[in-house]
Image (tube, rainbow, N blue to C red):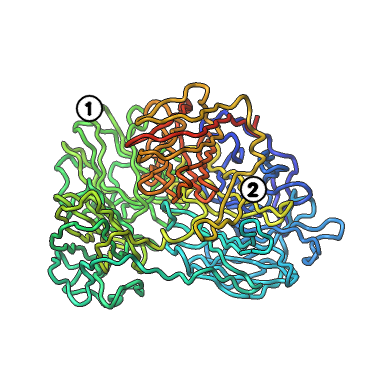
Amino acid sequence: MTAVLTAAALVASTSPVVAAPATETYRPQFHFTPERNWMNDPNGLVYHKGEYHLFYQHNPNGNSWGDMSWGHAVSRDLVHWQELPVAISHDDTEMVFSGSAVVDHANTSGFGTPDEPAMVAVYTSAPKTGGKQAQSLAYSTDRGRTWTKYAGNPVLDIGSAEFRDPKVQWYAPTKSWLMAVALATERKIRFYSSKDLKSWTELSDFGPAGAVGGVWECPDLFPLQVDGDPGKTKWVLVVSINPGGIAGGSAAQYFVGDFDGTRFTADGNGSYTPPAGVVVEDFESAYGSWTTTGAAFGDAPATGPLPGQLPVGGIEGTGYASSFHGGDSSIGTLTSPPFTVDKRYLNFKVGGGRHPHDPAAVTGDAPPPAGEVLADFEGGTYGTWTATGEAFGATPATGTLPGQLPVSGWQGDGLVNTFLRGDATVGTLTSPEFTLTAPYVNFLIGGGNHPSDSEAPTAVRLVVDGEVVRSATGKDSEALNWASWDVRDLAGRKARFEVVDEHTGGWGHILVDQVMLADAPAKPRSTETSVNLVVDGKVVQTATGADSETLDWASFDLREHLGKQARISVVDMNTAGWGHVMVDRFTLADAPAKSTVERADWVDHGKDYYAPVSWANAPDGRRYMIGWMNNWQYAGNTPTSPWRSAQSVPRQVGLRTIGGEVKLVQEPVRALDRLHRGSPFFLRDSTIREGSRSLGRHAEGQALDVEATFSLRDAERFGLKVLSGPGQETVIGYDTTTGELYVDRTRSGRTDFSPDFPAVQRSPLAAVNGKVTLRALVDWSSVEVFGGAGEAVITSQVFPDPTSDGVEVFAEGGKARIDRLTIRDMGTYRR
């Protein structure tokens, strides 16, 4: 692929990229992936002259985020995709962030002609040196093959650094263009109108509303018929959020409502009343019989923001407990007296930092095991360690560097800190060779979470005979904490300790101190800001805030602890950013309270469906949507090469009344059925007894289309296990005790590249007449599950061993019944 960029125009080759072979480990068979390099959000979805255009965020120069440009692929059926050269490229000054594309049939922009209307892209210009984000135009008059950037860019600039992802459509009632665009950190979607795509008039704002635990991005607004009734139309506003999604990290929520040409109004008023119960403590005037340690909680509850704190919301009454006394640097605990568990749930409000309880951590600053210090980076020198590149500078750091959030947790005066001149610098620091004379290597580590085997790591490595035998990373935190390697199997071997920073994006730095050989492993310090339920001296349930000063409802399920004595322990052991916790209104109740996140409507309940947008002008008035199949929690670390990330299968979306509420429903595009090959596997009227059983070799495969209808019996959980092999399985199940569809990928294969990856993802799904139906699209590195009438959807990446291709049925706690199971082998557009 070649492209030449001038100040005014981008001229690209029109030769298609040859389809990549489908033999690389994890390469999807029927999901679009670029031949090579990084991909994220879908952009510019438009249908023109028989082709569906899929543009996407793309790095033409590497397999990690950077140099954002618009990649390009086309399809005539939304299944078979042809990759084309980069469409709109980054240049020396800007990256080309997300946006949309339209066909300007009326030539309102003047970019085209009556015979050849222009395809116009509206994208976010993102300066490479930081600063403002603004909306710009590019246009094509040859079916999207070559593009010219508009000389008058940007066309919409409000002076904001967080203003992005325009979605533009023709709004016929006013004969004008309508734009929805995100004010990301304000959690708002702003609407604009234009007659020519160049001059824009502000109409209104929507938000904050629904889930607000992260930035808002990638809006999409469109009308849909309700229950297929042409006389009943509602508007849907899709808003992506990162972090703060239902399964953690990135996700997309939606609002159903009305649009009057100027303003979008969501149905309902957003109010919520939690279940009634017995208030255990509401902190209205004093801590009462609750006890405190440390200074973080002060002598009495807070009644508003504490000194130095941002405004606090979500307080019940006037008082609440806060550990921000003295700021984030203070620590302490707040503990209830014991109480007897006589209700099914403990509901409460929680806010502050998202720092979970770690059962392996120790409270306080207990000294690490004694041992031989290999490096403590004191004395203003790296000593005999060798540095390359620019990230490490000439000497160790002495704390926080310019532009960096506060660093904590190191010992003495010096530490390794590669934030020198920001995240853009790279380099390595290598110890002299030493002998592994002790069973453990202990060290303090912080900074970015980019594993050693990723393309651009921020990691420490133990190297023996030229091979990396151990590695570790930070946790996207400026607080250093203890980590340990068990090296007993390497006793007596020669080794080197390497500190590697090859990452130039967010959290592209690493912190290291106090590298030691020791006889025992160092235990990490607790850095939690959490609410813990303690039974028999053990933490049995835990919750945190969402890095927010707004308290929200949370709930502990007490059913297995009924009749026991319990305590509530509110713990703040964090001295870094968001190092505080806030709580209020502990209530024992018979039903759980639901958080704002749980009450929001989610397009997909899986961890891997972000930035979905739709084709606005698909034939026959259908609304097709596609999303990026990844999550910003670990997107840069997924173990794929030479490409990273796939798009979901395109889905047809609609609105259906379910349980008295209008809900978004989805189904895979029907053209996927053309990929079915060979004879399907059938199973009918079969009882699933407790345990798991294989369906045999005729049901095996790594690219499958599975449809199943189950009848509930007395099993607590039942379903399918796909991509199964020795020690591996991806579970697609139904939990009758909670009424939820779920996907469990904790044993799905490679999960070690991020602590956020192993997960059980759940979506509410009511059985209908005692039956549960689902469809699962299984590809080499993903599962997409559609439950019921398409109202419950879970999208999840998985990275199994290439030999893990088994399919099993299972039941737990009783029996279930398969009414009908069909498994079809999927072909591929790549073969």
Q: Is residue 182 left or right of residue 139?
A: left
**Who's the residue at 64% across and 66% down the image?**
179
Amino acid found under the numbered disc labelled 1: Ala
Q: Closer to the N terminus: mark 1 or mark 2?
A: 2
Determine whether the residue tagged by mark 2 lies in a helix, strand or loop. Answer: strand
Along the viewing direction, whichever of 614 and 410 lies nearer the viewer: 614
Along the viewing direction, whichever of 62 and 355 lies nearer the viewer: 355
Amino acid found under the numbered disc labelled 2: Gly
- Residue 71 is marked as 2
Could you tell me residue 411's position as x and y percent?
22, 53
Could you tell me residue 343's position as x and y percent?
23, 58
Reading the image, the residue beneath label 1 is 491
Q: Residues within 10 Å of mark 2 (few under 14, many from 20)?
A: many
How many callouts does the rendering have?
Answer: 2
Residue 376 in view here:
no
Question: Is 317 placed above or below 756 here?
Answer: below
Q: CA distance from mark 1 to mark 2?
A: 50 Å
Could you tell me residue 135's position as x and y percent?
63, 65
Question: Is 492 placed above or below 595 here?
Answer: above
